[in-house]
Every structure is written in C-alpha cells, then in structure tokens.
Amino acid sequence: MKKNMSEEVELLQYIYKNAEMGVIGIDNIITKVQDEKFEELLNNQKNEYVNICTETENILKKYGKQNEEVGVVAKVSTKVMSEMTLLKENTTQSIAKMMVEGTNKGIIEIVEKINAYSNSDAEITVLANKLKNTLEKNIDDLKKYL
C-alpha cells in the first residue's frame, strides 16, 4: 500500500531535521577543536549533512512544500549541552565521544523512520538510506578519535 503525500512529506521533514541537527552539532563544537585532522573530518561531515539538506529541499519542492527547520528549543538545548560537556573536558576524544553519541541517536531515529515509512517513494527511501549510511560512516570515522 502506498503512503499518502503527507506521510512522504513527514519523512522528508524528518530527514531534513536529522541532517540539520548534524550541522548544528558540528557548528556548536567546531571552534573548540584543536586537532587539524579532526576539524577537517568534522567539516567534511558537515558538508555531507548540508548536501542531504539540499537534496531534501529539492524533493520537498516537488511536493510543493518547504523544509521545517529544527526548533529554537532543540537548537539551544543542543548548544547548552555541548558547552557543558566541553567545560568538563575539552579534548578531541571527548568531542568525538559526544559526536558519536549524537550521531548514534540519529541512526536509531532514521532507522525507525525508514521502517515506519517503508512504502515511501523510491527517491525518498534512497535519501533516507543515504542519511543512515552517512551517519554510520561518520561514526566509523569518529571512532578513530575515541
């Protein structure tokens, strides 16, 4: 059975918000990073998230919709949590651990969404899996710094 358009849009909105949280998370900590290779890795990951956001926006336009950004409360709470964590310990290892934990949460959520919206248009399913694969790769890359 085919999902209706509103469910397709819901999945796209979720993909956008998940990728946007990756951008926000990296933006919150990138100025604290002291290791050049680690900073380069995070900037590459951020670019991947930005590309997924752009792809999502393009598909949403086909549905006559716009992306819904992450809410202010989520942005502020993420920033506060990052700053509190970095006040305790500002090492490459602690930043990598924080990023792995956040990314792992994103993987769990996108897998739940992929399962819940299993009958979505192929283009949307491919994008959702691209996000999942990107998140998994990002964790593998971050593990080197734990």
Image (tube, rainbow, N blue to C red):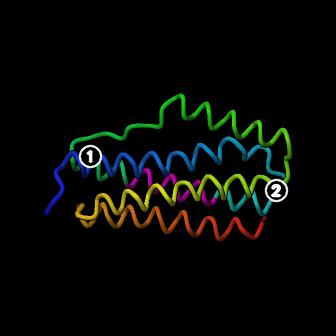
Check if residue 93 falls in the magenta segment.
no
Q: Residue at x 71, y 60 (%)?
A: 40
Q: Residues within 10 Å of mark 2 (few under 14, many from 20)?
A: some
Q: Which amino acid type is shown beneath numbered disc 2?
A: Thr
- Closest to the observer: 9 or 45? 9
Q: Residues within 10 Å of mark 1 (few under 14, many from 20)?
A: few
Q: Position of residue 10 (x, y in %)?
A: 30, 46
Check if residue 49 falls in the magenta segment.
yes
* Image quarter (top left, top right, bottom left or bottom right) of the C terminus: bottom right
Helix, strand or loop for disc 1: helix
Q: Position of residue 114 (x, y in %)?
A: 36, 62
Q: Residue at x 63, y 38 (%)?
A: 78
Residue annotated with mark 1 = 61
**Left or right of residue 16, residue 2 in this image:** left
80, above or below 49, in the image:
above
Q: Which amino acid type is shown beneath numbered disc 1?
A: Lys
Q: CA distance from mark 1 to mark 2?
A: 39 Å
Helix, strand or loop for disc 2: helix
Residue annotated with mark 2 = 92
- The mark that comes first in sequence, 1 or 2, is 1
Q: Residue at x 55, y 54 (%)?
A: 105
Q: Position of residue 102 (x, y in %)?
A: 61, 52
**Left or right of residue 3, residue 47 in this image:** right
Magenta segment range? 44-55
